Amino acid sequence: MRATVFALGVAILAAGRPAFAAATPITLGAAVQMTGAMANTGRYYRDAYQLAVAQVNALGGVTVGGEKHPLSLKLYDNQSDVNLGVRQYVELLTQDKVNFLLGPFSSDDALDDSSVAEKYRVPMVEGGGASSQIFSRGYSYVFGTLPPADDYFASTIEMLGKLSPPARTVALVSADDAFDVSVAKGTRKLLSAAGLELVVDKQYPEDNAEFASILSLVASKHPDVILWSGHEAQALNFIREMKSLGVSPERMASFTVGVPTADFRQALGPDAEYAFGMTPWLPSAAERDDWFGDGEKFAALYHQKLGYAPDYHAASAVADVETFVKAIEAAGSLDSGKVRDAIAHLDFQSLYGRIHFNPGGQIALAQTVIQIQHGQVVPIYVHDFVHRPLYPVPAWSKRLAHK
Amino acid sequence: MTVRWLATALACAVLAAVPLAARPTLTQYGIEALLLASLAQAWNILGGYAGYPSFGNSAFYGLGTYGTAVAMARFHQQFGVGLACGAALGMACACAVGVPILRLRGPYFAIVTLGLSAMLAAIVRNVAIAGRNIGLILPIFRSDTLFYELALGLLAAATAAVALTARSRFGAGLVAIRENEEAAAVMGVATTRFKVMALALAAVITALAGGIHAYWITFVDPASAFDSSLNVKMVIMAVFGGPGTVVGPVVGALLLSGVSEWLASAISSMASLFYGLVIVLAVLFMPKGLWDAGRGLRQRGLRYFGENLRRYRL
Amino acid sequence: MLLFAQIVVNGLLVGGLYGLMALGMGLVWGVLNIVNLMHGALIMLGGYAVYYLYTSAGLDPFAALPLAMLGLFGLGYALQWFVLGQIARSPLLNTLLVTFGLEVVATYLAQLAFSADLRTINPPYAGQHLALGGLVVPLVPAAAFGAALVLAASLWLALGRTRTGRAIRASAQNLGAARLYGVNPRRIFALTFGTGAALAGAAGGLYGLVAQISPYMGNSLTPKSFVIAILGGLDRPLGVLAGGLALGVAEALTGAYLASTYVDAISFGLLVLLLVARTSRLLRPA
């Protein structure tokens, strides 16, 4: 399966070559998680980068100074090892001499790898790190296409205020890595602004995720809402333990990751039902794109070429490639400083949404609240209701009766 | 004797010139390799000479890392001050826990050091000034040459320390402890004091390596500071090269990290597979290290490998 | 009060699994003097074995457990016979290194064969629970706990009452003397390592039922097994089981009343303290 995908990737890349026999390629480099604990999500980045580069080349590449240049990609496997990733980024810049950098998955990796970009003064556009820590260092060469972690639950909390029966008490469970600490910090502020009471606020170590104690504690407080922030693997764990300990929130539970991803739903089967989540992106015909037509066409093409459906990670990765193309063409040069300035002033429409970076370097996109209904991901709320949520969510004991 | 010193000086001079002449990636690799070699050499003092195999030197590495990082990021000190803080922290830890943990032998000592490292990492995760699990960000310093020379200097100092130790009564005492600790004690060797000194020396070198690495990488967090894979790496490199010798660990470290780095860039996806295989085969066929293998090959040729198998099998 | 009782129950259930995990490591360490750094990889392989038996052959996971154990036994036997036995008499550190290398290889191959996707073993009866008084006892972890107890007791009986068990213990104490009594060291050592691997495999299968499986799951389980094996006294099955239970409860209490982020500090802190405190009783031949 992986071999086929890889072969497809090569074929796609090779197919996009013919138009520019003489022009020097513009190389984008990245070290992503192709193997290792995060390979599950890392592969979205690898595949999306490859697809985006191929598509750009198929449609004429990048025009600089009247000349068309193909894009080329140099990818390394960081084996989900942050330290290796940092070394690989240095290698990309000093040995492979890539022109610009794309990002890895995960805030922890992006945090370190972006330091390399800043150190060598080469622009990096990353779509895998949302932690505010990445963008609060005063760096000028780093840009991110994931919306700030602090605001991940904003849409959800806003939605809760409009639902009935109302929710009043919240349990917050979060991991202790960069991304989730940012989420928790932001969520606490959002909750107090919305007048919701935090009855449980527990942090768990990201490498030793044992939820039984936390869940028993949560159960004893009977919260209306459970808000959970961590990594996909642990979300799975959490839901299963919720079920086996019979812990149900009175109204609903929402997770920062997992819900939009197909193999997460597959692993949980019917237990995934009713879970709320969020995504900054859903394939939509309304999001027009210069290379893929629109979001829906992109999703179809992606699924067809790679054999699985894309999620926001993939869309974010594609947006990163498109950002560079637009910036290079706007700057009319490959000079790092000029391209960096161009990126900072970009404002364009893509299949991922509106690409525009705030002064800190992060994009501003609202999270769409989604829910798994009958095995499908259904968009529920972004600024206003899109579909009706199944709310309040039935307790586990009542759900089992359905089966 | 003088020839050896000259040769060493020459080697140092050549190595020192690397960043000026070679590609930046070589300098990068060099920093990594030199730091690892220093770690292997530090391990060698307690593990190779005294026979106490530590599986938790990452504890001191982490303390050095955090000492430097906290001093620089929270208290805005200079790098030199930061390094000193890191080294002091490492030394303090060694002196504090040295006596109790050095009462254990062999694999039990290995495990207690492993536990110590894991415990420190887990504690640091909860310490606010250290940035908890997210860690700290250090100011950027754009000169790999500096870090390279520092790492080289550290390795030179560590090797010099080992060389001096090997020739001193301290060293003789350590070897006596390794061969037969009870007898050594009876003969008047201050076993506890020597062991703690060895641990402290190893701790300082290891902590300095951590501090240099921290400033180079610009970012510290508990997972990478107390990285447990470092423990295995430094043990393998020291053992592979030849524990209880002066140059063995350096050779082992430089060679193994060279192989590993080459594998990672040449066959990126299969790198870890080959790395694992190399280790297994190396230990099977050269259980006493490279240095011994070098000698054995010279004396007995390829039969050396066969003999190893026969001698050490069940 | 009820919360406290619930927490303790949670801890015991997890602790049973912990104990099982460490049984194999303790046995191998105590008898063969091998510190098996690939222990976590063996757990992982057991997990995948049960997973594939369940998903491809439709076998109930608990029924698949003996089969997985058999497979792992064979693997362990072969590893000891062909690889580890070669360096049995070289400096102790070398077994650490070889098992480390093997762990790297095994993890890589697993990643290649099974992909990094997370798997769960999710039989239809998973997620149910028994309500005893006000306590919630989840079904599958309780069954896993039961299986762990059974296996620990079996090991204890086997070591104590059977001829092979006595041969194993004799070899651990004095190999030379054992040989004089007709013990074949190669076979006994391979048998022991195989048993250790089988127990690890069982733990992996149960782990897949309770949590999830990935090629890298072994990384965190190996150090934990160390802690428990030492707590329990290595090749004393009941002691190791007790050690696992104790650790499970300690972790659960820490997680509920302190913060989950302290859990590792407590378990490794316990390890260090216990080792240091027991130095006078640990005069095993190095």
Image: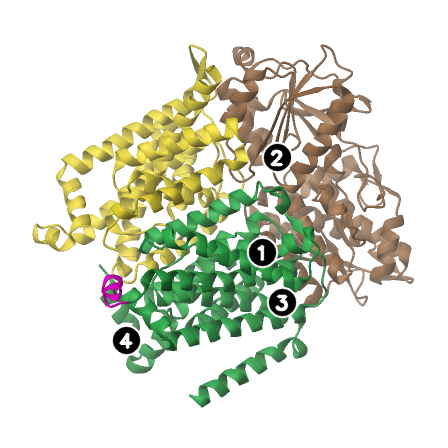
Whether the residues at callouts 4 and 2 have beta carbons within 8 Å, the answer is no
* Neighbours of disc 4 within 10 Å: few (<14), some (14-19), many (20+): few
| Between discs 1 and 3, the one toward the N terminus | 3
- A329 in relation to A181, above or below: below
Provide the residue designation for mark 3. B28
Q: Residue A289's x, y, as percent?
A: 83, 41
Secondary structure found at label 1 = helix
In the image, B241 versus B268, the foreground residue is B241
Image position, residue B122 (x, y; %): 52, 43
Which residue is denoted by mark 4 in the rendering? B303
- How many numbered marks have been drawn onto this rendered protein structure? 4
* Residue that mark 1 sits on: B65
Tag 4: amino acid: Arg
Q: Distance between the residues labelled 3 and 2?
A: 33 Å
Q: Distance between the residues labelled 4 and 1?
A: 45 Å
| Colour in which the image shows chain C | yellow
Q: Which amino acid does label 2 sit on?
A: Gly
Q: Residues within 10 Å of mark 3 (few under 14, many from 20)?
A: some
Local packing at callout 2 (Cα closer than 10 Å; few below 14, some 14-19, many 20+) is many
Label 3 and label 2 in one chain? no
Instruction: Decide which of tag 4 and tag 1 comes sooner along the chain.
Output: 1
Q: Which of marks 2 and 1 is in front?
A: 1
- Which amino acid does the dot numbered 3 rest on? Gln
